Image (cartoon, rainbow, N blue to C red):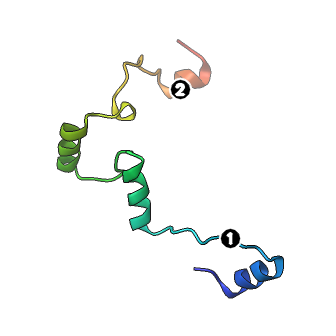
Amino acid sequence: METRNQRLIRELLEEREEPSDTSLRAQSLRRAKANEPPRTMTPFEWEQWYAEHGVPEGHRRGQRAPRRPWWRRLFRRR
């Protein structure tokens, strides 16, 4: 939604910009077309989605070395 002042500024500057659709429906449609995983679902829905589409790389847990406690990192001790 464009405010009155924004419209006046746009008209003064003679900008011709197409309004973009920022609704949730439009965002979910863009995400679906881009083949991106959804962002929020229940644990049961995630299980179903993983079964149908597989687990995306970003959702897999890596084999990282355990982090040292914060106080050892702070004082640089082993």
Q: Identify the residue position indicated by label 2 in the image.
A: 71
Label 2 residue SS: helix
Q: Residue furthest right?
A: 12
Spatial separation of the CA atoms under disc 2 and disc 1: 52 Å
Q: In the visual, does 7 lie left or right of 51? A: right
Q: Are marks 2 and 1 in contact (CB under 8 Å)?
A: no
Q: Identify the residue position indicated by label 1 in the image.
A: 17
Residue at figure coordinates x 53%, y 21% from the top left: 72
* Dot 1 amino acid type: Glu
Please state which of residues 17 and 67 is positioned toward the viewer in this rendering: 17
Q: In the visual, does 21 lie left or right of 59? A: right
Please state which of residues 61 and 52 is positioned toward the viewer in this rendering: 52
In percent of width and height, residue 56 lies at: 34, 34
Q: How many circles with numbers are drawn on the protein? A: 2
Quadrant where the N terminus sits is: bottom right
In percent of width and height, residue 75 lies at: 61, 21
Label 1 residue SS: loop
* Dot 2 amino acid type: Trp
Vertical side of 36 occupied by 8: above or below: below
In percent of width and height, residue 13 lies at: 82, 76
In percent of width and height, residue 14 lies at: 80, 77
Residue at figure coordinates x 69%, y 87% from the top left: 4
Which of discs 2 and 1 lies nearer the camera? The answer is 1
Image disc number at residue 65: none
